[in-house]
Image (cartoon, grey):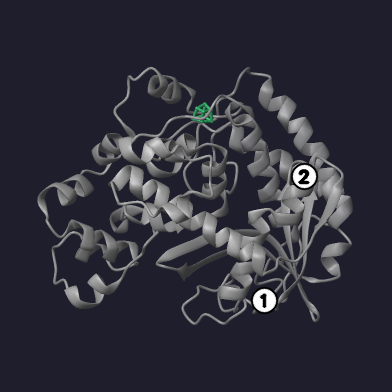
Amino acid sequence: MVRGNRFNPLQLFSFWSYSKAAHALGCTLHCFFADFLRIPKPLHPESALGQACHHDFSQFMTLHYTKKSPRGKYYYESLDAHRNRFIGFFTGAVKGEHPFDSYRHRTVQVAWCSPQESQKLLERGIYTVERFHWEFVELRRQGVWLTEVPFRFSWFDGLTLRGKIDLICLEPSGSTLIDFKPHQPSDKILRHGHQMTVYQLAVQQCLGHRNPKAKPPVKGRRRPIVPPVTRLRYYSYRGNGWSEAPVRGTDDIRELRQLLRALSGFYQTVLLAKVPVHRHLERYRFFKHDDLLTGDITPPPAGEQCTFCPYVDECDRTVAGQRPTARADFMDRYPKIRELLAGDPRAEDKIRMVLSDLPYAEFLGQTRIDPKPSIQIDLSL
Ligand code: SF4
């Protein structure tokens, strides 16, 4: 929970998603700006198109329940209807009537390079949607589909994983998880990419069980229990279509666990001055170990990861020594953490409590703190 009054900055260390881990793997400084400081930036035009396509695919594969169709109905039976709907949606988003990923919520700014760019992207989007239509129009009648399935579960040492699975096909023999990608994933990603490991784990840990507290996707209807995963697939909508990924084994899950432990430990050490556990960090050479001591994050050499990075200005100023250290920056952004660390001899214990998912009120020290169970909790990240 990272919004509104219940936002707890310490959960930034224990709440992880695949995309946040991917940011950190690409560049630890980018992840700091995007996911810890959460500096807002205009959306890249390619991301805007990607979001609009994802929204369109999800609407296409969803059974919509209305009073006239209590048993559910698919939208856009004809290609014309589908294409027109996409054009209307994308044009509305460009005009700022709604965001690119839904008809609701706040609109976002897009960093358009030229006035013609949105038109070019719309043409590409129409082509993508047409291909998708022919690929999925028969398929959607042949199975039971769940779209944009959110998940969130507490995994280990107070670490919570969350995210959203693009598409799940439920079959009597098991479930197929599908992710939409603009391009064909590399062989390495297909075989051992963390994204599918996270999704498979989400089915094992939460989507495969009935959760009495979960809000139903449609009023009055329960979300079906997702059976064990038997197939993992990518659909690349600007590439060659389908790619198969092997079902993940215990080694992949162990690898993911070690990675998240190392990532969380790295940021806790740099930003909160927590004593590092070197055996968790030493496997990951992309961390600059000097950063652990200085409380700063040094950018890696410029590379592919910088192509679409929106934080180039912040990065340049970091390199030029014109920004405070990452730790000081983080404390300025979340002054409650600075107060806690400066004025409270039990700060370490309280931080451990919060990282182990206890209520924020206790972290702030405004209400009763029961020291016994909390002090026993050792995250040892
Ligand atoms: S410009 Fe490159 S090095 Fe700098 S923050 Fe972005 S991705 Fe990292």
The disc labelled 2 sits on which kind of residue? Ser
State the image coordinates of residue 320 (x, y, percent, origin top left): 38, 17
State the image coordinates of residue 209 (x, y, percent, origin top left): 58, 81
The residue depicted at 32 percent of the width and 39 percent of the height is 293
Q: Quadrant of the C terminus?
A: bottom left
The residue that mark 1 highlights is: 226
The residue depicted at 32 percent of the width and 19 percent of the height is 322
Q: Quick check: is the Cβ at mark 1 less than 8 Å away from ligand 1? A: no
100 left or right of 298 in image: right
The residue depicted at 18 percent of the width and 59 percent of the height is 364
**Disc number lying in front (1 or 2):** 2
Q: Within 10 Å of the Cα at label 1, are there few (<14), some (14-19), or many (20+) other Cα atoms?
A: many
Number of numbered discs visible in the structure rendering? 2
Whether residue 194 appears in this view of the structure is yes
As measured in the structure, the alpha-carbon distance from the residue carrying label 1 to the one carrying label 2 is: 27 Å
State the image coordinates of residue 329 (x, y, percent, origin top left): 29, 34
Whether residue 149 appears in this view of the structure is no
Q: Is residue 140 above or below residue 210?
A: above
Q: Secondary structure at mark 1?
A: loop
State the image coordinates of residue 54 (x, y, percent, origin top left): 68, 48
The disc labelled 1 sits on which kind of residue? Val
**Residue 247 or 348: which is nearer the viewer?**
348
Q: Within 10 Å of the Cα at label 2, are there few (<14), some (14-19), or many (20+) other Cα atoms?
A: few
N-term-proximal mark, 1 vs 2: 2
**Residue 362 or 254: which is nearer the viewer?**
254
| Quarter where residue 69 is shown | bottom right
Q: Secondary structure at mark 2?
A: loop
The residue depicted at 65 percent of the width and 72 percent of the height is 67
The residue that mark 2 highlights is: 186
Looking at the image, do the residues carrying marks 1 and 2 touch, with CB atoms under 8 Å apart?
no
**Residue 186 or 265: which is nearer the viewer?**
265
